[in-house]
Every structure is written in structure tokens, then in C-alpha cells.
């Protein structure tokens, strides 16, 4: 089946990179809503100060999402990379391949994993995935969006990283994101699904492995990201939703039994926002939010007051075309730092080439907004098309230095950037 949702596709990080490599797509790219920043600066260098030389691994046709779980039940954390679609010129063809990287401590490598692949019998557009135990056997199961079919699909883990179909639940139009959390505090993990074309969020509760929609939240047009946290410090999980068309973050507070109420105050971010994450940036125990603004090369930081209200967002510089976003305290000063994936054009001999890099923005009290200018680093050895899709921060190689994992669709790789310098913390002390 062909997917002809060009507008959606350009929004939700299917790469335009391949199209550029065909040499024909500059005008189409520019006319889409997801116009990357154009610059005459060259590409970033692979700098050896902060990270080792990138290690690159095959990760399917169009690697996007990176999720963690113990998929083969050996008490080691594995990595799953999903490929929602095949790269096929103008057309995005459904795919749905999952590439597992199963941890094997006997491998003496910076990346001690064995990879294996699971393809669906019939190709499917699985834009997002979460790894949770929904059957209650302490084994990590999977839930994926079946984005074309307007549903989510449940896969229970047979215990050896093979999966059985556990049914599906109808949600809204173009489900593109799933997050998990225990909305009603009954110790059963629930989920929420972002329906891009309905401007809605399906809140879905899990009762002994049976999922049903408990509430549908109406949100601003073009919701593209959702994140969870306890914004008002009352011990239940609340929600924030980022909508692209309106540049707004909306806050929903949990009433304690899994019913969410929209707050009157909304928070305006920069143009063409792309991704949003939650964390405690200043380690004051109040949860904060951060958003990449791909249209204006900034991040918006939204500090929480711990009451369900947030401060007026502030902006910090991010460099060209910021997209995916993750955080950790690399330099161990109890203020979170940011790693951002970037997509932008470079001009080579008058010809625009779509490419990318990633950046590290370190906390620094010498600057009034608390952050030093971003340090830009090449995400790949590839000279073109090295634009990251998703990023994750963890300690892969067990040397206590923080590492970064990045999916790069254009080269079909999962890339490990092993940390060289920072013995940091993944969260506040
Ligand atoms: Ca629950
Ligand atoms: Ca709460
Ligand atoms: Ca905070
Ligand atoms: Ca820091």
C-alpha cells in the first residue's frame, strides 16, 4: 500500500534526504512545511574531543525510533529500532521492520549487541512504538501505531524477543506517537496516543492486558509531541501536548483517577516546533519542558513551578534546524544539558544538499540564560545525509561515560557516539 500523505510525512520526520540524493527535490522540500534551515556554512567535523569516532550499524530501511527493554529476558537492556516505511523516492511505502540489538556481555566491543530482525507478514506503517509489560508477566511487550489503519496493535513477548499478535484498539486519524504511564495509579501501565489528523489524544487504560479508550482529549491543531510528568507534584502523572500549527504547549492535569483536565494557561514556543521532552533542567524537583523550534534555530525552555503552572518560556540558541531532543547532565553540575539533532542545507558548488549533525548544549552560569552556545558535531562518517531522526542517551559501553545513540535514516544506520569526556548523570542527583 502506498502512503500519499506528503504533508504528514514531512511533519513526522520521514527523511527528505533521500529525495535530495536523487537531485530533484529541492523545490518540493522548500515548499513543504518542514523546510530545513539553509546555510552556507559547511558540515560539522567529526570532533574527537567529546565523542569517539561514530560506530554505525545496519538498522533497517528507514530507522527512526529507538526504544529500550529486556526483550529476551536475560536481565540486560536491549535496544529496538523501528523502520516505519521503506525509502522509495517520492513515495513512502509501508514497512514496519523491527531491528533488535540484544545485549551480549561476552562481546568485547564498544557496542556489545547481537542484532536480529522481525518483519511483519504484511508491511505496515508503524510510526511509533512503546515497550511495556502489559500482560503482567514482567516481560517487555510492544505496542505500535498502525498509522494508516488508525489503530494501535498489541504484541505480547513470547520471552525470546518473538511476539504474538494480541489484538488492536481503534484510535484516531494518523496516530503518530505513543507514550506510556500509569494514568490511574493501579500499577498497570496505560498508554496515550497522539492522533495527528484528529487534533486529539486517545487516553487508553490497561486492565489486565485489555486496552480501551478512557478519554479523548481535544487539542490544538497538528499535535506532534506528547510528554508526561507530574507537573503539580501531587504524585499522579500529568500530560503536555505540543501542537505545531499554533506553536503552543497545552497542559492537562490528572484528577488522580486518570481523568485529565485542560489548564487555561498555554505556553507559546518558537516557529515550527518539532519535538518536546520533559525533565528537571535546574534540579529544583519541579518538572520542566523543552521544545525544539525547527523554524527559528532555538530551543524553548519552560520551567515548571511545581503547581501545574509554568514560567513564561525562554529561548536559547540551538544552531541550524533543530529537531530531535534529549537531555542528561553531561558535565555533572546538577543542571541538565541538551543533545539536539539537526537537519539543514549546505551549499556545495551552488547545489543545495540536505544534511545534518547533532549538538551538545551545556549548562553554563556564565551565560544569562544558563546555557553556553551549542557545540556542533557530525553524527556520522557519511559526508551527506547525516541528519539524525531520534536520539537516546545512555551508557552503552559500561565505562561510566555517557554515550549517545542516533538513528540516521538516509544511511539506514543506528550510530553509537561513545562518550570520551563526560562522566555525567542521566538525571538530577
Ligand atoms: Ca493504570
Ligand atoms: Ca500530577
Ligand atoms: Ca525544574
Ligand atoms: Ca550540566
Image (spheres, rainbow, N blue to C red):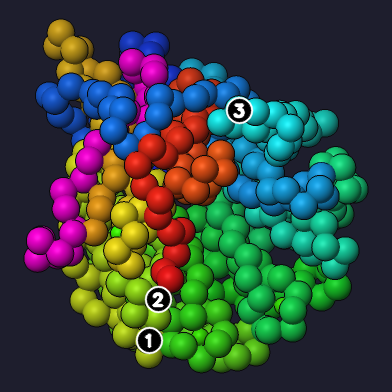
The answer for how far apart the CA atoms under marks 2 and 3 are is 36 Å
State whether residue 94 is above or below residue 236: above
State which quarter of the image contains the N terminus: top right
- Residue marked by disc 1: 306
State which quarter of the image contains the C terminus: bottom left
- Report the magenta stretch's main SS: loop
Find residue 15 and report its horizontal and vertical position in percent.
44, 30
Residue under the image location 29 percent in, 63 percent down = 333
Does the magenta portion include 367? yes
Residue under the image location 62 percent in, 38 percent down = 81
- Residue marked by disc 2: 287
Query: Is residue 97 at least partly visible in the picture?
Result: no
The answer for how far apart the CA atoms under marks 1 and 3 are is 43 Å
The verdict on label 2 being within 8 Å of ligand 3 is: yes
Q: Disc 1, disc 3: CB below 8 Å?
A: no
Say which mark, if any, is on residue 384.
Answer: none
Report the label total. Answer: 3
Image quadrant, ligand 4: bottom left
Helix, strand or loop status at disc 3: loop
Magenta part of the protein: which range?
A: 364-388
Q: Residues within 10 Å of mark 2 (few under 14, many from 20)?
A: many
Amino acid at each position: 500500500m502506498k502512503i500519499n500523505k506528503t504533508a504528514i510525512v514531512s511533519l513526522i520526520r520521514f527523511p527528505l534526504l533521500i529525495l535530495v540524493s536523487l537531485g530533484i527535490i529541492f523545490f518540493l522540500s522548500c515548499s513543504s512545511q518542514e523546510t530545513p534551515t539553509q546555510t552556507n556554512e559547511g558540515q560539522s567535523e567529526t570532533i574527537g574531543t567529546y565523542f569517539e569516532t561514530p560506530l554505525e550499524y545496519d538498522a533497517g530501511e528507514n530507522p527512526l525510533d529507538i526504544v529500550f527493554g529486556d526483550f529476551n529476558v536475560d536481565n540486560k537492556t536491549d535496544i529496538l529500532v523501528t523502520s516505519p516505511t521503506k525509502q522509495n523516492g517520492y513515495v513512502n511505502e509501508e514497512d514496519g521492520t523491527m531491528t533488535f540489538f540484544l545485549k551480549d556481555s561476552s562481546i568485547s566491543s564498544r557496542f556489545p549487541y547481537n542484532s536480529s530482525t522481525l518483519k511483519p507478514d504484511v508491511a505496515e506503517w508503524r510510526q511509533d512504538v512503546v515497550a511495556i509489560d502489559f500482560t503482567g508477566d514482567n516481560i517487555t511487550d510492544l505496542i505500535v501505531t498502525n498509522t494508516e489503519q488508525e489503530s494501535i496493535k498489541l504484541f505480547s513477548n513470547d520471552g525470546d524477543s518473538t511476539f504474538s499478535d494480541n489484538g488492536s484498539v481503534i484510535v484516531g486519524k494518523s496516530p503518530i506517537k505513543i507514550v506510556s504511564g500509569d494514568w490511574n495509579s493501579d500499577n498497570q501501565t496505560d498508554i496515550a496516543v497522539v492522533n495527528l489528523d484528529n487534533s486529539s489524544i486517545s487516553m487508553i487504560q490497561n486492565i489486565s492486558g485489555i486496552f480501551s479508550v478512557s478519554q479523548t482529549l481535544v487539542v490544538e491543531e497538528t499535535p506532534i509531541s506528547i510528554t508526561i510528568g507530574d507537573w503539580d507534584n501531587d504524585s499522579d502523572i500529568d500530560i503536555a501536548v505540543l501542537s505545531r500549527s499554533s506553536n503552543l504547549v497545552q497542559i492537562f492535569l490528572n484528577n488522580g483517577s486518570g481523568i485529565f483536565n485542560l489548564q487555561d494557561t498555554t505556553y507559546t514556543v518558537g516557529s515550527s516546533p518539532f519535538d518536546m521532552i520533559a525533565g528537571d533542567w535546574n534540579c529544583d524537583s519541579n518538572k520542566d519542558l523543552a521544545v525544539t523550534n525547527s523554524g527559528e534555530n532555538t530551543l524553548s525552555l519552560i520551567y515548571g513551578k511545581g503547581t501545574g503552572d509554568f514560567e513564561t518560556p525562554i529561548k536559547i540558541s540551538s544552531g541550524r534546524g533543530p529537531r530531535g531532543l534529549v537531555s542528561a547532565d553531561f558535565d555533572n553540575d546538577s543542571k541538565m544539558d541538551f543533545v539536539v539533532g539537526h537537519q539543514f542545507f549546505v551549499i556545495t558548488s551552488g547545489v543545495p544538499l540536505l544534511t545534518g549533525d547533532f549538538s551538545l548544549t551545556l549548562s553554563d552560569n556564565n551565560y544569562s540564560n544558563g546555557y553556553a552556545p551549542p557545540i556542533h558535531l557530525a553524527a556520522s562518517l557519511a559526508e551527506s545525509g547525516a541528519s539524525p531522526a531520534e536520539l537516546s542517551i545512555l551508557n552503552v559501553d559500561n565505562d561510566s561515560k555517557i554515550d549517545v545513540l542516533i538513528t540516521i535514516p538516509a544511511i539506514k544506520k543506528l550510530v553509537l557516539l561513545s562518550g570520551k569526556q563526560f562522566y555525567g548523570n542521566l538525571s538530577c542527583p
